[in-house]
Image (tube, helix red, strand yellow):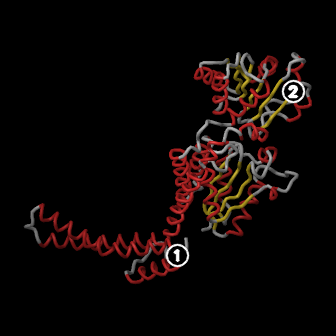
Amino acid sequence: MPITCIGLSHHTAPVEVRERHAFPASRMAEALVALRDYEAVREAAMLQTCGRLEIYAELDDYERGVAQVKSFLANFRHGTTGYDIESYLYTRLGHEAVEHLFRVCTGLDSMLIGEAEILGQVKDAYVAASRAKSLGRTLHHLFREALAAGKTARAQTRIGGESVSMATAAVEAARARLGTLEGASILVVGAGKMGRTAVKRLRQEGARRVIVANRTIARSRGLVADAGFGEAVELPELVEALATADVVVASTGASSFVLDEERVRAAMARRPDRPLFIVDIAVPRDVDPAVTAIENVALVDIDGLKSVVNERLDLRREAIPQVEEIIAEYVQRFENWYRARVAVPVIARLTQKAEAIRAGELERLLARCPDLDERERMLVTGMTLTIVSKLLHSAILKIREKATSDRAEALSSARLLEDLFELDLLDGPVSSP
């Protein structure tokens, strides 16, 4: 099964490396097209989140294909990195690659176990690859099964219990820092999903004032309207908003620092004796780490939030054995489907040929028996369908069973059927997929 997953994640790479290899959403299609053009890559999809960048691919050859995907990751868009990317990458092959995607979809591989956002992110990756035409039959089926496994795990277990997300973790970190958020002034930079979650949680925590800053003022106003709480400002007003804030939660999709040292220093000059706590949950990061050199400024990035949420995940951890059973079932189902593909062309052509013969003979019979009424014609037609179905049933069932248990024997049986019934497959003789 020449399926592979190559990537880096919060398990293997710090945020400063992950952000270096983040692809802007606007360039994802371009990246997928470039990846698809590597000669050993049959199909490809790219999954990018704040905690991971992974490429899933079906390859013509493991050795050449893995080397080409790694070359793509090292060179596309990034140029010289100053470090060896190989030291941060992991490679999963065959069964391990399939199982890994299912673990990702069910939330078992997430920084926050069972996080809800990952399902939407995997779906977005699937849609992006479909639009870029970099998906084929294998990855199309794999991603759909992985998404189904993720939904099943959340419906049948408590892996998604005790709502925890990076946005709620950021708010909890702020509460832990200040003791309470009641009466606090909070600046939320970014009006995406994380920003929305943060604003709702801040309202629950009793924040006195919440300011939402975004590149597009319309999105800030939309968030504030939906939440029924807060006020919207534009990014040029950041310094003024920073000067009034006790806490900042930053989560935009910007490719460069939104809060640089100059802006933060200018804001702190207006309130030198008041501390400012910043939580940056964006990848690439929104806040320049250099701001920590400014007096009274403290900064936590996404990797620093792990300890904040660990204590909230005990309920989810209890569900892990159940989720692993679900994963095993879905992995087995996908691998059975994959192995059975060897029989598909022969079964399809055999069925088509049998149907053509049946329809032709039936037409000749009915032409010779013009006196048959409509009911009699239906009975004769039904009888011919039953005969063909019963004749083919055992052969089709056996070859499918062999395909899932002994692929080599299934391939031999498929070739025998091809020869015996002169199937003349348009794609040439049966071969390994």
* Residue identified by numbered label 2: 297
* Residue 399 falls left or right of residue 246: left
State the residue at coordinates (89%, 17%): 273
Among the 4 quarters of the image, the one containing residue 216? top right
Among the 4 quarters of the image, the one containing residue 304? top right
Location of residue 272 in the rendering, given as x and y in whole percent from the top left corner = 90, 18
Q: Residues within 10 Å of mark 1 (few under 14, many from 20)?
A: many
Location of residue 263 in the rendering, given as x and y in whole percent from the top left corner = 85, 25
Distance in Å between CA atoms under marks 1 and 2:
62 Å
| Quadrant where the C terminus is found in the figure | bottom right
Under circle 2, the secondary element is strand
Under circle 1, the secondary element is helix
Location of residue 161 in the rendering, given as x and y in whole percent from the top left corner = 59, 39
* Residue identified by numbered label 1: 407
> Which of marks 2 and 1 precedes in the sequence?
2
Location of residue 294 in the rendering, given as x and y in whole percent from the top left corner = 91, 27
